[in-house]
Image (spheres, helix red, strand yellow):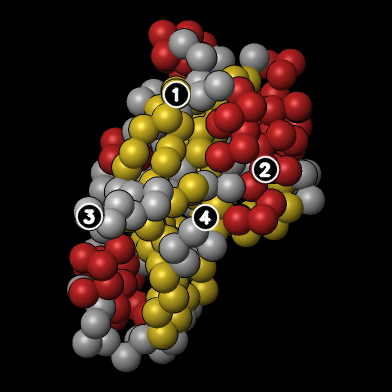
Amino acid sequence: MKNIPLLKRTPLSGIYEREGASCTQEAGWLIAKYFKDPAVERDALDRGALLADWSHIGKITLRGTGAADAAGEIDSRARSLPILQATGSGKIALLRLTVDEFLVLCLPGKEKETLRKVANRDVSVLNHHGGLGCLVLGGAKRDLVLERSCAMNLSRDLVGPGAVVQTSVHSINCTLYRTTNLEVLLHERDYSQSLFEALMDVGEEVGLIPTGIEVIPVGFHIGK
């Protein structure tokens, strides 16, 4: 009899069960596909606000004096990337947190492939696996949710696409990565459920609803 590997679960698996989310398997993770009605959730992407769980994406820290060169092996633009800015494609993103530290986000299951690119570089590497949670805000009204959740001024004339911000959201320390269409919130795994529930609570007034990767797929948004 073959050994069947156990599916990894995100910190929101309890919320999936409570809300009756429809789930799927991706790169060994059990992840929400959608919550109630994918048509309603797609409409909210155009007219309202959505909150999705991306805790299954790859998250790798590169740290040390060779971090920029190592990051450059993944994307050559990273070598000259300013601090608190990001670069990437639809499949990968590199966030420069300090002179000597990058956070790399990649598609679920692509961590080993990404790590091979930096294997011969003099750099400290930390593969976060499931140690970091990742929530994503999307939709036309997502800015209103952030305004109610963060004391920091995150207006788009100050913080544009590609920006990286170290801030607190509902008193939870987060690294916020702003893409053209999404707000990516990275944080300690243990705080994911509290952050999810706090965002849903303040977002209720503007119609925030939860969704899954069928409506906000990782591959089309991670580095844009």
Q: Amino acid at mark 1?
A: Ser
Q: Amino acid at mark 3?
A: Lys
Which badge, 2 or 1, is on the more N-terminal residue? 1
Which badge, 3 or 2, is on the more N-terminal residue? 3
**Residues marked 2 and 1 touching at CB (< 8 Å):** no
Looking at this rendering, what residue extends furthest in the front direction? 1
Q: Amino acid at mark 2?
A: Gln
Circle 2 or circle 1, nearest the eye:
1
Q: Crowdedness of circle 1 by 10 Å Cα count: few (<14), some, many (20+)?
A: some
* Whole-number angstrom distance, CA of label 3 to CA of label 2: 34 Å
Quadrant into which the C terminus falls: top left
Q: Which mark is residue 193?
A: 2
Q: Amino acid at mark 4?
A: Val
Circle 4 or circle 3, nearest the eye:
3
The residue lying at 36 percent from left, 86 percent from top is 123
Is residue 107 or residue 85 the one in the foreground? 107
Under tag 2, what secondary structure?
helix
Q: Which mark is residue 142?
A: none
Mark 1 = which residue? 22
Is residue 54 or residue 69 the one in the foreground? 54
Residue 144 coordinates in the image, percent (x, y)? 67, 26
Under tag 4, what secondary structure?
strand
Residue 97 coordinates in the image, percent (x, y)? 51, 68
* Whole-number angstrom distance, CA of label 2 to CA of label 4: 23 Å
* Whole-number angstrom distance, CA of label 2 to CA of label 1: 18 Å
Mark 4 = which residue? 164
Quadrant into which the N terminus falls: bottom left
Mark 3 = which residue? 2
Image height check: is 113 above or below 164? below
